[in-house]
Amino acid sequence: MKVQILLFATLKDAAGGSRAELVLDASSVTVADVRAALGERYPAMQRALGTAIAAVNQEFAEAGDLVLEGDEVAFFPPVSGGSGEWPLVVRVAAAPCSMDELIAAINSPATGAVCAFSGFVRGETAGQGGALEQTQRLEYEAYETMALGKMRQVADEIRARWPDVQGIAIVQRTGTLAVGQPTVFIACASAHRDQGCFEAARYGIDRLKEIVPVWKKEVRVDGSFWVEGGYTPDPSDRADHPGVR
């Protein structure tokens, strides 16, 4: 059985490419089997595989889930448009976006308040002992098709928690970003400021950092490294899970 695999961030570096193909001599193959075979093929990847998240057909997968011929299997580190009457913008963008245009896109005649959050590339970070560590740039990578689906899931979760929220925009930049450039943008609109738009925007950025497969490589004068998160998705993070947040 042939299995096609997508690799991202640290796993891609360890394998020397973003794609791998495995031939497994078994009639029934699980995600755990694929993970083990990858570790045997690429010994340098074993450490990263220990904490890597698996996805099958762009949905989070557990160790015992079956992998069938033709499935799209992906492994990646923990993460560092839609339906309904209200507007939704979800985008993985390789080029700069206008924040004014994004806010205008989620506005409606019923909108009286918009709360927006944007992250930026920070040039200085406090290190050990208080010394400042200098960042030259960040390089962002995304599992784009899955990222868009998970952004829509975040929007669905926001509306389930704050039903008065109207328009939602979630945009993640990719590629090489210089110090001072925006990296992510989330905005939530509502009729009034006390109808959840503040809380929803905060939830949106926090949830994006948990389940949307995007990673960054930090490049400094003395070297570079992938920045990985510490959150491991569980079955409740699947879009088709009945208990989804």
Image (cartoon, rainbow, N blue to C red):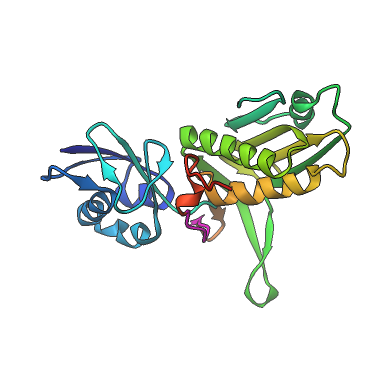
Magenta segment, which residues? Answer: 225-233
Q: Is residue 136 left or right of residue 45?
A: right
Q: How many marks?
A: 0
Q: Quadrant of the N terminus?
A: top left
Q: Is residue 230 magenta?
A: yes
Q: Position of residue 137 (x, y in %)?
A: 60, 48
Instruction: Say above or below: 146 vs 76.
Output: above
Q: Position of residue 47 (x, y in %)?
A: 34, 63
138 vs 98, nearest the viewer: 98
Q: Outermost residue toward the bottom?
A: 129
120 vs 146, nearest the viewer: 146
Q: Is residue 4 left or right of residue 242?
A: left
Instruction: Say above or below: 145 vs 29.
Output: above
32 vs 236, nearest the viewer: 236
Q: Determine which quarter of the picture holds residue 85.
A: top right
Q: Residue at x 72, y 26 (%)?
A: 86
Q: Is residue 145 visible?
A: yes
Q: Main secondary structure of the magenta part?
A: loop
Q: Position of residue 18 (x, y in %)?
A: 35, 40
Q: Residue at x 53, y 58 (%)?
A: 229
207 vs 19, nearest the viewer: 207
Q: Is residue 107 left or right of residue 142?
A: right
Q: Position of residue 33 (x, y in %)?
A: 22, 52
